[in-house]
Amino acid sequence: MNFTFFTDRDLGKKFPAILSAAGLKVERHQDHFADDASDEEWLEAIGKKGWVAVTHNLRIRYMPNELAAVILHRVSLLVVIGKAPLPELAASFVETMSEIEVFLARQKQPFIAKIYRPSPSEAERGVPVGRVELWHPKPR
């Protein structure tokens, strides 16, 4: 499948550059919106374009306006999980791309999913890819 990934402002410049260098189609927040654009503004635009939004903002699901925008505008939103430098998170995202693509092909919009890096014990065992978990709507 051919997805366009939109990285929001909290992922900076290095994260999208790493995704782009890996051959993914990436659109950066700063190329389309002002720094002070509201999350609701870019979520609406991304939903209309059918792009997959990527953020590191763990609180977005708990913000009523942002969650409403995800639902209203039928957004596919991936939340990168982990306390690591953004280049490491980006590399893990790229390594997990096959899992992400399968998830995106199967999951009906709108949704919020979490992208995890391999845990330290998984990495120790040589597990090269992370995992994708549906966050909203809550899995049944």
Image (cartoon, rainbow, N blue to C red):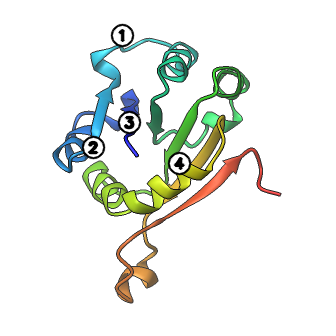
What's the residue type where badge 4 is placed?
Answer: Leu
Quick one: label 1, few (<14), some, or many (20+) residues within 10 Å?
few
Residue 18: % across, % down: 21, 47
Place residue 108 in its image quadrant: top right
**Proximity of marks 3 and 2: CB atoms separated by less than 8 Å:** yes
- Above or below, 134 relative to 13: below
C-alpha gap between disc 1 and disc 2: 23 Å
- 112 shown above or below 9: below
Q: Which mark is residue 34?
A: 1
Q: What residue type is labelled 1?
A: Ala
Quickly name the residue at label 2.
24
The relative height of residue 107 versus residue 31 in the rendered view (above or below) is below
User: Which residue type does callout 2 highlight?
Assistant: Leu
Residue 36 position within the rendered picture, expressed as x and y whole percent measured from the top left: 42, 12
In the picture, measured across the screen, residue 105 lies left or right of residue 63, that is: left
Q: Distance of mark 3 from mark 1, alpha carbons?
A: 18 Å
Q: Name the residue under label 4.
A: 104
What residue is at 39 percent from the left and 31 percent from the top? 6
**Type of amino acid at the residue the image marks with label 3:** Phe
Looking at the image, is mark 1 or mark 2 nearer the viewer? 2
For this rendering, which residue is in front, 105 or 44?
Answer: 105
Q: Is mark 3 on a helix, strand or loop?
A: strand
Q: What element carries label 1?
A: loop
Residue occupied by mark 3: 5
Mark 2 or 4 closer to N-term?
2
The residues bearing labels 3 and 4 have C-alpha atoms spaced at a distance of 11 Å
Q: Which is nearer the N-term, disc 1 or disc 2?
A: 2
